Amino acid sequence: MGAIAAGVNLVAGYPGTPSTEVLETAAKHNDGSIYVEWSTNEKAGMEVAAGAAYSGARSMVTMKQVGLNVASDPLMSLEYIGVKGGMVVMVADDPGPISSQTEQDTRHYAAFAKLPCFDPSSVQEAYDMIQEAFELSERYGTPVFFRPTTRVCHGYASIDIKEPSEYHVNKPDGFKRDTMRWVIFPRLSYANHKKIEARNAKLSEVFSDYKRNFIERYNENNDGVSRGIATHGISYTYTQEALDSCRASFAKKDGDAETEFPDVLKISTPFPFPEELAVKFLTGKKEVLCIEELDPVIERQLIYLCGKYNLNVKIRGKLTHDVNDAGENTIDSVKESIAGFMGWQDMTANPDATGNGDDAAPPQLPVRPPVLCAGCPHRASFYAVKEAMRGKNTIFCGDIGCYTLGNAMPLDMVDTCLCMGAGLGIAQGVGHIEPDKTCFAFVGDSTFFASAITGVVNAVYNKADMILVVLDNSTTAMTGHQPHPGTGHRMMELAANYEKPADDIANVVSIENVLRGIGVAAVETVNPLDHKKSVEIVKKMAGIKGVKAIIFKSPCVVMVKHDKPKAVEKDKCVSCKKCINSIGCPAIILNDGRAFIDASSCTGCGLCAQICPVGAIV
């Protein structure tokens, strides 16, 4: 919504929690004047947004932190080239990690790429700050990072927004040919590198006066405060709440007794670091605690400044183990860190002192491990391969998506998982070293387009012997069912007054045709819910040399229900538990020692009925 108010002309990206809803919101509130697309992957999205910014448009590209790795190739060169229109690279980090492979901190990427970075601490600040990010990008001719974390991205709050009449209107003036500006080559890169360093030194001064970087005083008499807290993002919100709670507790406990509270330095632009403001904050302090997610970026900057300006201040944080060095912060963890730093141990040890008023600890939440949905076609696909290859020397290389959950028992069908598209390369590497092993690589349909095609090309070119399994459920299910090149739908369809062209179906990209065009030796498409046929095809493909592909095609069960729920005939059930022990469907449970199907969960896929040895499931 903030990007729309800033007059964004183009939004591109690739879905990835917790960034996904940003592009989707832009699409849903699009009056038709904004071009919005889910790009094939983050690299493509970065380049599309750059082209728009070359033309004077305001553009935004969205992704999660691991997606930035994919987009880093054009990004690193784009910084040397610069942009004409404002360009925001919206990268959502995922402390925890809650839904990611890594706890990668994009603030490092900002310094690595020499790009300004904005780090919002709340929903309101995200709305306001991204508009300021576009302004700064345009003023200095550079892309800028915008780095919200999961708790900001998934926060929910009432905020003040602009009326449409107050929106910035940006009219791109078009691309102007200038090879000395837009064509990257060594001489230009060298000259621009020097300009970038000078610009970032200037931005450090600018950011020291930026209204969202500030020192917050918690004492009536601010002279001689010896301790401080440096923080950022959602951790600033936690710090505020923790200090307010402690202040209330001291007032309740000690009446009018004065207790020294730390000054707080809020950093909203971790790069270029607001050096002048930080030095002002450090001067006169004896100790500073840095509370941040994910890495000790602020902590290291303050240590550097203490050395540079000969300031005798002890900097504490992750490096000194005063703050957890992994995982996300919480209000409780921040309060505990502050209490230890300030010597307020009783603020966490005594429930009455905190003002919570509850003596009993809350009950532990039940463990809810992630699991494939009841009726998910991926379960049927994995089970067909497992049955066909039972007793054989195999490796099953997985990938990022819903199907990563195929690693859980009883399926146990994911031996490796590294990053999107990597399963193809790993299967090839293992196969070249162990030629007697049958190597499988599983990949989803969206991931196939995003990052697996080059792996297939590599396999064909280098004469690998492997089986590619494309789990085609016709959507990007894990991140919320976004379209992709194989669906025939685009985000522009959500725009107001959009009229879908009659020939739009021609834009569907066929996975089978792509594989045949690359030169895959054999390609078969089968519905995985036909268990017998699926097993036959897997066995057939395993007997063929070279690169083979099986496309298991069946729609995501969240989008298309199969049939009426199944049920177990008690008189026929022999309690063999094969339906439970083989596929692990959450809709099948034990009731009085016999299998029982929960009709509210069952989608009627029929896989269990096909594997029941006594035909008890109808």
Image: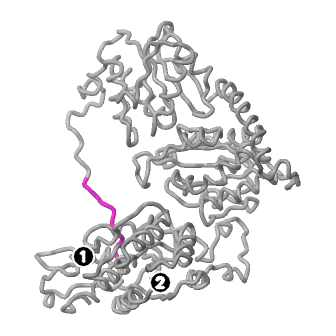
- The image shows a total of numbered marks equal to 2
Residue at 71% across, 76% down: 500
- The answer to whether 579 is drawn above or below residue 288 in the figure is below
Please state the extent of the stretch shown in magenta in the rendering: 366-374
Q: Is residue 113 left or right of residue 521?
A: right
* Dots 1, 2 in contact, CB < 8 A: no
Report whether 543 appears left or right of 253. Answer: right
Question: Mark 2, residues whose alpha carbon is within 10 Å: few (<14), some, or many (≥20)?
Answer: some
The answer to whether residue 553 is visible is no
Write down the residue under mark 2: 546
Q: Residue at x 79, y 48 (%)?
A: 169
**Image position, residue 142 (x, y; %):** 73, 42
Camera sees residue 136: yes
Instruction: From the viewer's perspective, tell me whether residue 372 is left or right of residue 454.
Output: left
Name the foreground residue: 268 vs 197.
197
Q: The disc labelled 2 sits on which kind of residue?
A: Gly
Q: Which mark is residue 588?
A: 1
How far apart are the alpha carbons under marks 1 and 2?
39 Å
